[in-house]
Image (cartoon, rainbow, N blue to C red):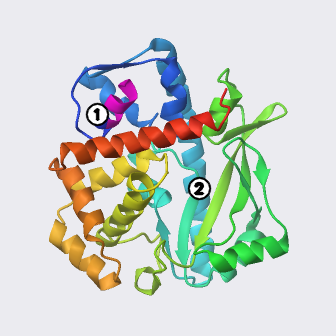
Amino acid sequence: MIREELILKLLGYNNQKLKLDMDDLFFLNKAKINGLIFDFLDSDTLEVDQTLLDILRELSSFNYIRNVNLLKEAINIDFLLERHQVKRTWIKGIAELFNNPSNLKSRKQFDIDILVENPYQVRDLMMEYGFTYGAYDLHGNWVTANKDEISSLEKEDYELFPLTKNINLENLHTKVNPDTLTLQRVFKEGTHYFTDVCLDIHNELTFDLKPAWILKNGFFPTMDEIDEIWYLLNKSFYEQIEGHSLNLQSLIVIINKIRQTKLNHEEIKNRLDLTGFYNETAVNTMFHLANGTIDDSELNKIVQTFMHNFENYKNHSVPS
């Protein structure tokens, strides 16, 4: 029950005091919320067992190291693409880190995403730069495919097959369980540690939307606020609320963006109308969730769906 109460707290719906211990570590890591916990430690509404707190602090340091490396690599890539006059837009998590560097410790990143007009041109540039086809899975295993499989997958999707480049992490020493580090995207090979830069090159947004008006030149272009909100709003609705994603971090991020923006419900709705992807249920649900006007039964359904997805994942995996 405490995890349901924690979800409600992170969404802004629970002021009761909660206590977390080591049994909650896997849940925090899997839901990508271990960094967000620190926002509540000064409020006297969340108590964390000292052993768990020590591990969360160490993981936060690793997360900072990883995110700094991801951002450095993304900026280097951006300079390269600008030299080749590639119109582009950085999207999702890496854009959030660039625009809000205060999140370098707390935001958990799996990959970096870029939206471009000609993905194959960018792919070739990235492979010359040192990237290779493939990615590490959630257990730290390297996964790739042959040329025909990659070509077939890319024709059916809105993004290319992942490209990855490894970055060595020098002078890193830790007693944290390797499986826990793997969930943090820090891997061990022999006696040294490394992290991965996994690049997802998009030629469309999730909804088959052609991105021409979103693409830009200049230094590290990101989406305008109104486009970022409708895009993340829809993505989170279909993935976390209607789907099976365990990325609670993404849902919390967009809910907070809706709360903080000066844009209103009608402006977001009108922008979505222009794209042709307006879903009244998605927009209303997310705005009600952000504004505190969501029906109790609907809120409970969101929490229970997430917990069902987590238990289903846990029962089909073997975490240490």
Badge 1 marks a residue whose secondary structure is helix
Disc 1: CA contacts within 10 A as few (<14), some (14-19) or many (>=20): some
Residue at x 57%, y 40% (from the top left corner): 313
- Badge nearest the viewer, 2 or 1: 1
> Between residues 101 and 295, which one lies in front from this camera angle?
295
Report if residue 100 is visible in the image: no
Residue 158 lies, in percent from the top left, at: 57, 75
> Between residues 73 and 211, which one lies in front from this camera angle?
211
For the residue marked with disc 2, what is the amino acid?
Asp
Q: Is tag 2's residue or tag 1's residue first in the polypeptide sequence?
A: 1
For the residue marked with disc 1, what is the amino acid?
Lys
- Give the farthest residue toward the top: 50
Residue 249 found in image quarter: top left
> Between residues 282 and 86, which one lies in front from this camera angle?
282
Left or right: 126 as drawn, with respect to 25: right
Q: Is residue 71 above or below residue 180?
A: below
Left or right: 14 as drawn, with respect to 71: left
Instruction: Using the numbered discs, state the Cα–Cα distance from disc 2 to disc 1 in whole angstroms.
Output: 27 Å
Q: Which residue is mark 1?
A: 9
Q: Is 3 colored magenta in this rendering?
A: yes
Number of dots carrying numbers: 2
Left or right: 211 as drawn, with respect to 63: left
Q: Which residues are magenta?
A: 1-7
Q: Quadrant of the C terminus?
A: top right
Residue at x 71%, y 70% (from the top left corner): 126
Residue 300 lies, in percent from the top left, at: 28, 41
Disc 2: CA contacts within 10 A as few (<14), some (14-19) or many (>=20): some
Q: Which residue is mark 2?
A: 111
Residue 206 lies, in percent from the top left, at: 48, 71
